[in-house]
Image (cartoon, grey):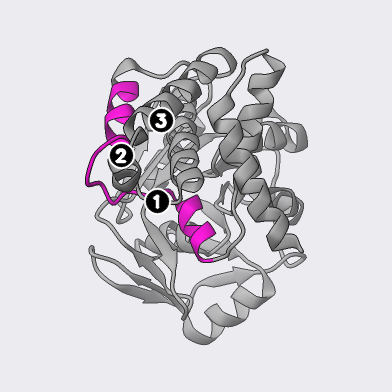
Amino acid sequence: MRLLVVGAGSTGGYYGGRLAQAGRDVTFLVRPGRAAQLQKDGLQIKSPFGDFACAPKLVTAGQITGVYDAVILTVKAYSLDAALEDLAPAVGAQTMILPVLNGMRHVDAIRARFGAPALVGGLCRIPAQLDDAGRVVQMGKFHDLAYGEMDGSRSERILALDAALRDAGFDAKLTPEIEREMWEKWILLAALGGICCLMHGTVGEVAAAPGGRDFAAALVDEVVAAVRVVGKAPNEGFVASTRETLTKLGSAHTSSMYRDLQRGAAVEADQIVGDLLRRAKQAGIAMPLLSLAYASLCVYQSRQAA
């Protein structure tokens, strides 16, 4: 199977690198600056599961020749529109597009640009970042990639994709519940991001503050209530686990959005928080706590743009 990985940051670099290590036919679509870095230093992964380096196959925008069997889309959500433009020449009538972006806006965008049949649902869970040398650094011992047809069917093409992704050095899972799992991940990211970014602390620090645990639990409940109306209802076990995780005393857990905020980088505020607020507003649902978090993030973003 011919695979195109769009992006070679912490997510695309890790999963694409592992696939290349396992002998899969992988090409990376990257920006010119990242291409120059990878051509010079190679793609390097630092991981508890073993370090790895390779000389990746690379293309930049305008260099794609021919279509691919599957496109794994791993860019940040705020780079989605540009990425869809760049990858368009790789998409043929049978190409699957597997996005692992945050939120759900990308689902609508891919369907609008390439048609609903092109879309395969997907999500990943991996604590990783690029270091100053451009190496992918995995910071924890999990590296999950889940995927499936949005209607839950076991199609011939999804089974072929599953065969290509399995046994490649990470935990790959074909699931008939990918849409629900994507909404559950959005719940977690919106709630965790709202808690950490509004309060400027870890889960444990917020929980230890006066009224902090009540605030965090209320924000989780607010997000869950909205998703039950505007999206796919989560499992009750997931809700209970999320509430417990995000109100835990002593926890050093933070959101990637808060870590980006701390280092002065761009954040996915509109995609993780703003888009959920927009959908809730259209459904007549008030989300006062998440709205405060979004306002705070917008202040940060306006400073970044100044």
Q: Is residue 248 magenta?
A: yes
How far apart, in angstroms, are the residues tagged by discs 1 and 3? 13 Å
For the residue labelled by badge 2, is the local secondary structure a helix, a strand or a loop?
helix
Residue drawn at (67%, 69%), measured in percent from left and top? Answer: 31
Identified by mark 2, the residue type is: Ala
Residue placed most toward the observer, 206 or 155: 206
Residue drawn at (74%, 57%), measured in percent from left and top? Answer: 86
The residue indicated by pointer 2 is: 207
Identified by mark 3, the residue type is: Phe
For the residue labelled by badge 1, is the local secondary structure a helix, a strand or a loop?
loop
Give the residues drawn in magenta, as a range.
238-263
Q: Residues within 10 Å of mark 1 (few under 14, many from 20)?
A: some
The residue indicated by pointer 1 is: 201
Residue 215 is marked as 3
**Badge 1 vs badge 3, beta-carbon distance below 8 Å:** no
Which badge, 1 or 3, comes first in the chain's sequence? 1
